[in-house]
Image (tube, grey):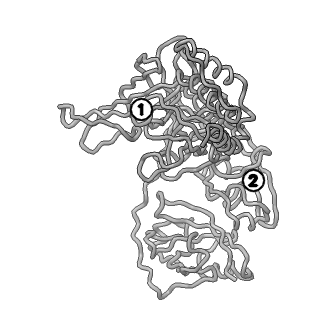
Amino acid sequence: MSRTREWLKLGGLAAVTILAAAAFIGTVQRAPNAEAQQSASALEALTGTQAAPVPAAAQPLADLSASFTAVANAIQPAVVFIQAEAIESGPRTQLRVPPGFEDFFRIPDEGQRLRRGSGSGFIISRDGYILTNNHVVEGATKLKVRLFDKREFEARVIGRDPATDVAVIKIDGTGLPAASLGNSDSLKVGEWVLAVGNPLAFTFTVTAGIVSAKGRLLAGLPIESQYRIMDFIQTDAVINPGNSGGPLVNIRGQVIGINSAIASGTGFYQGYGFAIPVNLAKVVSQQLIADGRVRRAILGVQIRDATADDASYVGLQEIRGVVVQDFSSVDSPAKKAGLEPGDLIVELDGETVEYVAQLQQMVGFKKPGESVRVTVLRPDNVRKTIAIRLGEAPLEQTLAANRTTEPVEAAASGNHTTKLGFAVRELPADLVRQVGAEHVGLRVMTVELDSPARDRVLAAEQGGGFGDIITHVNGTRVQTIAEFEAALNGVQPGAIVSLRIFNPSINGGTSRVERIRVPR
């Protein structure tokens, strides 16, 4: 094949790639071109050799490469490597530090040992404040920070917020390189991003990808707070253990997230990483620097994302919003203001509410004592806006331990099968005393395999301890089978029934709302 044909083949392959990157290429600024020209001039000066010209068809890709180079050069000086150390006592005590590359060795003092972990962070002020993850520094007795230029500093913790997994640490210095913080609210799915950090002991590593999704809620993360906020940016830029706390930056070199987690069955990269939106981190870091802690505003509600049945139940055409399950306490601001279990929250201060993490973040940007207007939907197309004065989350929040309850055998005799596809039984006197009078209802004993309630209610036979207790049907209090059936009287096949449920075996007792469509 002639040289001309080889160039034509290369041009054709490049054209296909250019089409895939067309949306991005239109936004590339002229500065990277200048940098590419400077690099070529430097090469000529060093080697006396003229750089090979870039084929016209490949020029946009060269511009893209130069843009990545410019962003990496701009952000790397502000990124830091963090080494955390802690002395532990006892053979089974574990320090929660980033996974991967942790060294254990004994200190000859009654079983004490030193545990080391590493992570990343980035400087946000020229006098040495650094943003990172809470789980990178939690429990550490000594922190060492190394900069991109190889300088090393001892660091101290300014404040930590387990609910958002954000922490601020400080090194003593002046004129330090600080990262530019962007606006994560304006981030769009499909945008190019770079992740910078120290994965797997490979320090100051840069990887590229796109924003794969926003508003991700990750189950199973070790964030032990009832008021945790998880509204993650998902990216396919490679993130591995050690990247935690490092910046996720846009093509302008602005930080739009803190790299925090990966979705993996092995503990290593398998396709997607997750970052905390920088707008949330800004609010948290400002309070940590000012007060050493976060004063978190709360509505005082337990909530979940709306389902199709929730939307249909209140007459909403699209599936969005969050459902009020229960209240955090008797002093809940939302309860005092008039919110009710089962309400579907669709707006906060006139802004549309789509999902749980979004509402958590919207409230998280407020201050305790501020008033907000919450719009809810109720059955029969009832729309109500309620003013709520926000409360403050307790400084120390621990989840209640599970109650120790004795499960009762789910004998078939005495069960009452309902039209919703599960069987219930009235609570005997001894169980009434255990759950408390306010939670008396009908205990779910069995659930039919083909029932629409199969994934919505927990039966005693499924290992749920007590199983679920139905306390309300369509807002009506039910404690006997007769009351349960009366509440369902007139409900037609295909209609949606709202159940309020209490389970004494989960987190010391929790209430929730489930919507179930009656089988046709």
Residue 363 appears anywhere in the view: no
The residue carrying pointer 1 sits among few (fewer than 14), some (14 to 19) or many (20 or more) residues within 10 Å by Cα, namely few
Would residue 274 be found to the left or right of residue 20 on screen? left
Would residue 47 be found to the left or right of residue 65 on screen? left
Badge 1 amino acid: Phe
Q: Nearer the viewer, mark 2 or mark 1?
A: 1
**What residue lies at 61% left-to-right and 15% top-to-bottom?**
41
Residue 126: x and y in percent read: 56, 16
Which is nearer the eye, 436 or 73? 73
Could you tell me which quadrant the N terminus lies in? top right
**What residue lies at 55% left-to-right and 35% top-to-bottom?**
195
**What residue lies at 57% left-to-right and 37% top-to-bottom?**
208
Which is nearer the eye, 35 or 423? 35
**What residue lies at 79% left-to-right and 63% top-to-bottom?**
317
Which is nearer the eye, 329 or 279? 279
Q: Relative to 180, does residue 517 appear above or below in the rendering?
A: below
Please name the residue that numbered disc 2 is placed on.
346
